[in-house]
Image: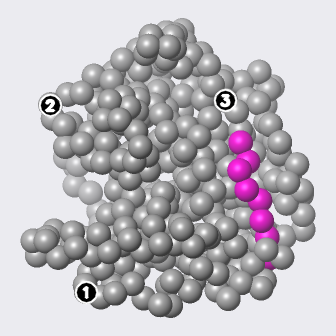
Amino acid sequence: MAKGPLKRAADVAVYAGIRAAIAAFTLGDPDATLTAARRIGRSFALAPFNAKRLVRAEANLAEAFPNWSNEQRRATAVRGYEHLVMLGVEIALNGRLISHDGWAGRANLGQLSGAIDALLGKGPVVLVTGHVGNWELTAYLLALLGFKIHALYRPLDIDLLDDWVRASRSRRGMHLLDKFGAIRELPQLLERGEHVGFVADQNAGTRGVFVPFCGRLASTYKAIGITAVRHNAPVVVGWARRVGGEPGPGGVQVRPRALRFDLNIVDVFGPDDWKNAPDPAYYVTARYRRALEGAVREAPEQTLWMHRFWKSRPRHELDARPFPESLARKLGDLPWMTPTELERIKARSARDTEEVARMTPQERKKAGGSED
């Protein structure tokens, strides 16, 4: 749809303001800028207008860490907001401080052997990360190492800003793939042996596939599992964790060190792992979501708990039906699933069914709504 003169002028003004703010970030001392970002994030988290989102974050933490105290959940939820603003600063600083010549002083690559073997193979690789740590940096570092990465993303609403983001990423070897055109482009890229990256922990709506996440069924993108199976593409799950300068004992604030990260590969698996699975695509989806849960549990303070991980509910909960035997079999067929964990998931689903029954029609519509 064509934009009118006023909308175009507004877009230009917003673009200029954002670029000016980024320039201000990159001109100052990086460590001091990151300290300021942490304070801004904390102030935002505790602001009255953010109260509902903070409560949601604490409720999500209660799902993942039921044995934590309310104080622990509140502190971690606030640190998630600190992390979000610090992440914005880090993205602005990427081009200045992480380059072909300087990245080694900023990132510890850890154990990458499995991932490198997959990336050096003849076929495509599916790279998966989540909203934990610096998800922008994961594919960015691999691109700096010389691997051509196509990262799926949602285009920005402001064309000028979107063009700038695309151009800046491409200069480092990372190519952004419009999620709305991916259904046409993805198969072609994978058939050519190209590597594709996804941020894959958002709510996928009622059309997603429901797999466990922190003991509760979460709607997850099914296209990733289908893509990996169809193209025999190994799956690499990784994330970049900020290190240094975290709050010390008693919550004492330590000055953060700008752009210091550990790149962690938490799982690498391929066709040999799912070839005997009754439902290979479900296996892939459940396994990468399990790997992302491991990352979240390792660094809950660097996770965006305000996201609606469990917003959409499966059809049997919306229709107040018993837990489907077919779903129970799928879960039970997962090699890592224990009878105790399966019963926990079924019990949580029963509670969700009761909660859905108490919802207003409008709330129930949201629970059966689209992806985030």
**Label at residue 261:** 3
* Contact check, label 1 and label 3, Cβ < 8 Å: no
> Most prominent secondary structure in the magenta stretch?
strand
Residue 161 image offset from top left, x and y in percent: 43, 43
Element class at badge 2:
helix
Residue 32 image offset from top left, x and y in percent: 49, 9
Q: Is residue 213 left or right of residue 225?
A: left
The quadrant of the image that shows the C terminus is: bottom left
Element class at badge 1:
loop
- Amino acid type assigned to the residue bearing label 3 in the image: Phe
Marks 1 and 3, the one that precedes in the sequence: 3
Residue 220 image offset from top left, x and y in percent: 48, 69
Asked if the stretch drawn in magenta spans residue 309, the answer is: no
- How crowded is the residue under tag 3: few (<14 C-alpha within 10 Å), some, or many (20+)? many
Query: Which residue lies under the disc numbered 1?
Result: 319
The residue drawn where x is 75% and y is 78% is 274
Q: Which residues are magenta?
A: 264-271
